Image (cartoon, rainbow, N blue to C red):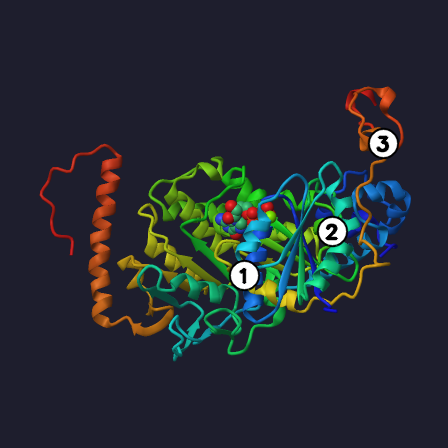
């Protein structure tokens, strides 16, 4: 059975995850590695077509009405098994962090977070475990913002994550992809995920709305709820 | 760590303060970091999105970074040739010294941007061209490729714009504080004054960066790269704005001892460099040293340019251009 190296790539929608993964996998495939992608999304995705056009095997999971983060962690093991059956050398999972409190990174599995320089210089402060606990941070779209903003942005990324190397990558031209490929080459091969842990707990909510409640009102506020405080009512 | 109060810790390490400020919970100055975290409780920590030990590790790393210097000084950058698009060897070993300007010329699609990209990522034979870049005659230290505050290379191009919703003064001050320069206010004022000296259309510090014209934007980017960016190497990709005093801009970068590479066909820029690299089929085909005759021609071209600038200025003021023009060369 193949022992693929596993890499999780996470980032908000449209930051450039697919573009970057494609550029990096092009480089690794050219070295003769067999690469594949497990794509997670919530409602629908076109990314599988982009991967398939390059001849990259891809499996798609749509979380639908479930929290995409919880859906990811309950299915990543099966994705790894799929990768083993495909005989992959490298399996990349692509998942969209939809709420900024997402926490998809797994202990011992190379974790990449993609952020977008165009999203505004304060964005790195607003992203939780997905950015803070990543092993590698990729900043995209640096080609359309000023050098000065890139420097401020990178500084804020560094405050949010002083552990991870930070790489600027242009998802369109692939500038910077070589550095990312370097890190992916050194990812750990994974036999199985059974018993491994997430680096941080996922956002939780066990309340009537989790199981389909649609009515608004205090009588439905049971279980794990949190209420806002207002300045004028202190 | 726990003996020091949070207030003292933050004063000593502004980065730690900036990080802790992202947590929306009260932070008394008197107690120590560990005591503060102990008091927060599990639920609050879960809301903050980090465990106690993750926060302690994070703070420790930010403290260490505070002590680290910026990029190492670069006296020389060397390009070792790889191969061109046809697979032929690129027989080049070119060393560029601090304070030197090198221009890159060649048809569109010939590989000028690829060369800039190789320098930007300090290629080590691991890009499609197989080129290698040496810093001070040695391969760059691994950290300098991946740590943004030690990044050796700054890049400016025609496609780049300011997108942040801040005034010029606010933004430059913010950049200065990230760079942790002493006297951030003084430096910020100097950047803005310098940018204004580079452009015919001056702007106020109170204007929003997104409202600057093309020429004003380039002028501010160049002044900022020269005076605030820590990167000793500056790559410029096709900046051909008429609204910027280009020779002054280059003088400014060179005065800061930067190594400047410009991809351009603007005669004023191309002849201003000490050397120019001719790119064909993705490879450096020729290195031309600017001759004495070319330098004399540059002076003539500068007179033409000054003449045009003067007319532009007069048109802006609403004047007529009725007189017979002298040939400026
Ligand atoms: N200018 C620019 N556009 C980019 C870059 N990276 C991605 N894009 C564009 O951003 C859009 C979203 O990219 P995609 O890879 O689908 O994002 P994902 O949702 O995170 O997978 C696409 O139109 C890309 O072409 C970049 O570095 N620069
Ligand atoms: Mg995608």
Q: Which residue was labeled with disc 2?
A: B16
Give the Cα separation between the discs numbered 2 and 1: 29 Å
Name the mark on residue A63.
none
- The image quadrant that residue A26 belongs to is bottom right
Residue A219 image offset from top left, x and y in percent: 87, 20
A120 displayed left or right of B98: right
Query: Are there few (<14), some (14-19), or many (20+) residues within 10 Å of tag 3?
Result: some
Nearest the eye: B270 or B133: B133
Asked if B280 appears above or below B45 in the picture, the reply is: below
Label 2: state its secondary structure. helix
How many numbered tags mark residues here? 3
Chain holding disc 1: A
Query: Are there few (<14), some (14-19), or many (20+) residues within 10 Å of tag 1?
Result: many
Label 1: state its secondary structure. loop
Name the mark on residue A207.
3
B131 displayed left or right of B147: left
Nearest the eye: A64 or B183: A64
Chain holding disc 2: B
Q: Quadrant of the N terminus of chain B?
A: bottom right
Residue at the left extreme of this rendering: B324
Give the Cα separation between the discs numbered 3 and 1: 44 Å
Label 3: state its secondary structure. loop
Q: Nearer the viewer, mark 3 or mark 1?
A: 3
């Amino acid at each position: 059975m193949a022992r693929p190296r596993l890499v999780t790539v996470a980032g908000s929608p449209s930051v450039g995850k697919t573009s970057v993964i494609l550029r990096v996998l092009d480089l690794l495939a050219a070295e003769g590695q067999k690469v594949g992608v497990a794509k997670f999304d919530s409602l629908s995705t076109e990314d599988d077509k982009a991967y398939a056009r390059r001849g990259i095997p891809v499996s798609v999971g749509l979380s639908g009405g479930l929290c995409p983060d919880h859906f990811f962690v309950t299915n990543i093991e099966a994705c790894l098994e799929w990768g083993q059956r495909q005989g992959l050398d490298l399996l990349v999972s692509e998942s969209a962090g939809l709420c900024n409190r997402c926490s998809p990174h797994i202990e011992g599995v190379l974790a990449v977070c993609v952020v977008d320089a165009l999203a505004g210089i304060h964005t790195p402060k607003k992203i939780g475990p997905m950015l803070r606990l990543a092993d590698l941070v990729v900043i995209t779209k640096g080609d359309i913002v000023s050098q000065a903003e890139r420097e401020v942005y990178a500084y804020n990324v560094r405050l949010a994550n002083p552990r991870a190397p930070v790489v600027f990558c242009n998802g369109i031209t692939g500038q910077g992809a070589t550095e990312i490929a370097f890190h992916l080459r050194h990812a750990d091969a994974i036999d199985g995920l059974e018993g491994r842990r997430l680096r941080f707990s996922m956002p939780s909510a066990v309340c009537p709305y989790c199981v389909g409640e649609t009515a608004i009102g205090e009588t439905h506020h049971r279980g794990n709820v949190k209420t806002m405080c207002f300045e004028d009512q202190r | 760590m726990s003996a020091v109060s949070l207030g003292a810790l933050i004063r000593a390490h502004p980065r730690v303060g900036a990080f802790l400020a992202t947590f929306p919970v009260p932070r008394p100055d008197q107690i120590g970091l560990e005591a503060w975290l102990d008091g927060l409780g599990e639920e609050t920590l879960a809301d903050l999105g980090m465990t106690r030990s993750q926060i302690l590790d994070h703070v420790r790393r930010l403290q260490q970074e505070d002590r680290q210097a910026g990029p190492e000084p670069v006296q020389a950058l060397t390009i070792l040739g790889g191969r061109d698009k046809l697979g032929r060897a690129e027989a080049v070993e070119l060393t560029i010294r601090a304070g030197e300007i090198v221009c890159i010329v060649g048809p569109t699609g010939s590989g000028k941007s690829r060369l800039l990209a190789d320098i930007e990522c300090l290629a080590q034979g691991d890009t499609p061209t197989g080129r290698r870049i040496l810093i001070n005659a040695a391969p760059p230290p691994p950290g300098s490729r991946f740590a943004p505050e030690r990044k050796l290379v700054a890049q400016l191009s025609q496609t780049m714009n300011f997108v942040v919703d801040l005034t010029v003064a606010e933004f430059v001050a913010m950049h200065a504080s990230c760079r942790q320069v002493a006297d951030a206010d003084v430096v910020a004022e100097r950047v803005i004054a310098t940018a204004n000296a580079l452009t015919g259309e001056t702007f106020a510090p109170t204007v929003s960066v997104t409202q600057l014209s093309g020429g004003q934007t380039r002028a501010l980017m160049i002044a900022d790269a020269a005076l605030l960016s820590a990167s000793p190497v500056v790559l410029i990709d096709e900046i051909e704005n008429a609204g910027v005093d280009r020779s002054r801009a280059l003088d400014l970068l060179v005065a800061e001892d930067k190594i400047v590479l410009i991809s351009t066909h603007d005669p004023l820029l191309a002849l201003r460099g000490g050397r120019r690299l001719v790119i064909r089929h993705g490879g450096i085909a020729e290195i031309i040293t600017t001759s004495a005759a070319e330098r004399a021609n540059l002076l003539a071209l500068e007179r033409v340019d000054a003449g045009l600038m003067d007319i532009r200025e007069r048109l802006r003021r609403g004047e007529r251009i009725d007189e017979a023009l002298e040939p400026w060369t």
